[in-house]
Image (spheres, rainbow, N blue to C red):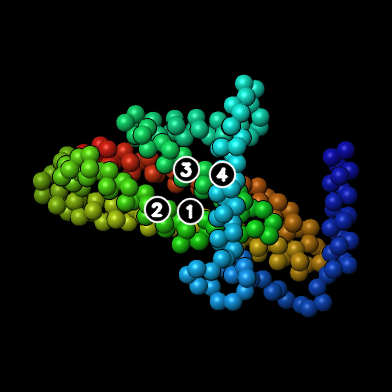
């Protein structure tokens, strides 16, 4: 049965390639157009414009509320699929915070859980056809990373006072190297929000750009469009994995930074 379905799909692709083969030669692929911010009501994009970014961030919030609030409101003994996903996510992130940052970091669990769910839902929504991936924009990920950086820094000074500066002083190193290492540690600390944000946005943007390129090949090759379609299928499966992994990496780095704030000594 599976082979029959495969051959049917292949035949449809070949026929469509013959019927809708492009009349013009050459490839017209613009993979970065999908990241363009556009106003939903036309006109110039300004500070208060309702854009495609606004729409898909709102949908991300609605989907997050539906997953974590509505699906768990009944708290059924035999959970539904949505409730099971919410409970698995809750246990997964709770264990991560406890293992990485320590038990005294559990008070920050709601914040970290919110970060993870928002990013993973936004990543998965960005994989839908005709959607917009908000986490591919550095403006979005930079705000998330900046909030983590500010939160961790404030917590570090509030909890430890001047002792938080011990994070930059490598007491186990020789005395002559400690000032140099302190400068390196200080620079790396302020680079954190940059790498934190670029890592997420860069990976999501790169994956979507690759999908767009292969889709352009499929539209331009006509009869042989089935070749890039196979590649699209493989890349799309990889992007599903990347969507979760990047949310996981962003979250676990947040836990690592929080651990440094709560226990700053080297």
Question: From mark 3 to mark 4, how far is it between C-alphas?
Answer: 9 Å
Q: Residue 81 location, x and y as percent?
A: 66, 32
Residue sitting at 20 percent across and 51 percent down?
Answer: 181
Task: Give the mark, 3 or 2, whose residue is nearer the N terminus.
Answer: 3
The residue that label 2 is drawn on is 145
Vertical comparison of 99 with 219: above or below: above
The reply to whether callout 3 and callout 2 are in contact (CB within 8 Å) is no
Foreground: disc 1 or disc 3: 3
The reply to whether callout 1 and callout 2 are in contact (CB within 8 Å) is yes
Residue sitting at 81 percent across and 67 percent down?
Answer: 222
Residue 200 image label: 1
Q: Secondary structure at mark 1?
A: helix
Q: Residue 89 location, x and y as percent?
A: 53, 34
Residue sitting at 65 percent across and 63 percent down?
Answer: 212
Question: From mark 4 to mark 2, how far is it between C-alphas?
Answer: 19 Å
Classify residue 244 by image quadrant: top right
Foreground: disc 4 or disc 1: 4
Specify whether 197 is left or right of 69: left
Q: Quadrant of the C terminus?
A: top left
Classify residue 206 by image quadrant: bottom right
Vertical comparison of 219 with 238: above or below: below
Task: Give the mark, 4 or 1, whose residue is nearer the N terminus.
Answer: 4
The reply to whether callout 1 and callout 3 are in contact (CB within 8 Å) is no
Say few, some or many: other residues with alpha carbon within 10 Å of mark 4 (under 14 / 14 to 19 / 20 or more).
Answer: many
The residue that label 3 is drawn on is 114
The residue that label 4 is drawn on is 64
Say few, some or many: other residues with alpha carbon within 10 Å of mark 1 (under 14 / 14 to 19 / 20 or more).
Answer: many
The reply to whether callout 3 and callout 4 are in contact (CB within 8 Å) is yes
């Amino acid at each position: 049965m599976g082979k029959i379905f495969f051959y049917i799909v292949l035949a449809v692709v070949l026929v469509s390639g013959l019927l809708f083969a492009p009349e013009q030669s050459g490839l017209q692929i613009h993979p970065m157009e999908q990241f363009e911010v556009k106003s939903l009501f036309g006109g110039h994009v300004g500070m208060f414009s309702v854009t495609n970014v606004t729409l898909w961030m709102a949908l991300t919030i609605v989907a997050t509320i539906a997953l974590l609030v509505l699906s768990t409101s009944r708290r059924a003994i035999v959970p539904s699929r949505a409730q099971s996903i919410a409970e698995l996510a809750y246990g997964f992130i709770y264990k991560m915070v406890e293992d990485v940052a320590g038990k005294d970091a559990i008070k920050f669990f709601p914040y970290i859980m919110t970060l993870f769910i928002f990013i993973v839902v936004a990543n998965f929504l960005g994989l839908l056809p005709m959607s917009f991936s908000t986490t591919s924009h550095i403006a979005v990920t930079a705000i998330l990373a900046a909030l983590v950086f500010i939160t961790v820094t404030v917590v570090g000074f509030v909890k430890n006072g001047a002792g938080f500066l011990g994070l930059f002083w490598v007491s186990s190193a020789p005395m002559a190297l400690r000032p140099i290492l302190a400068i390196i540690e200080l620079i790396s600390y302020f680079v954190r929000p940059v790498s934190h944000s670029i890592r997420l946005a860069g990976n999501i943007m790169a994956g979507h750009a690759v999908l767009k390129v292969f889709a352009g090949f499929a539209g331009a090759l006509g009869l042989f469009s089935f070749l890039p379609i196979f590649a699209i299928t493989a890349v799309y499966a990889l992007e599903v994995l990347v969507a979760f992994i990047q949310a996981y990496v962003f979250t676990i780095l947040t836990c690592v930074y929080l651990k440094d704030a709560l226990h700053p000594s080297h």
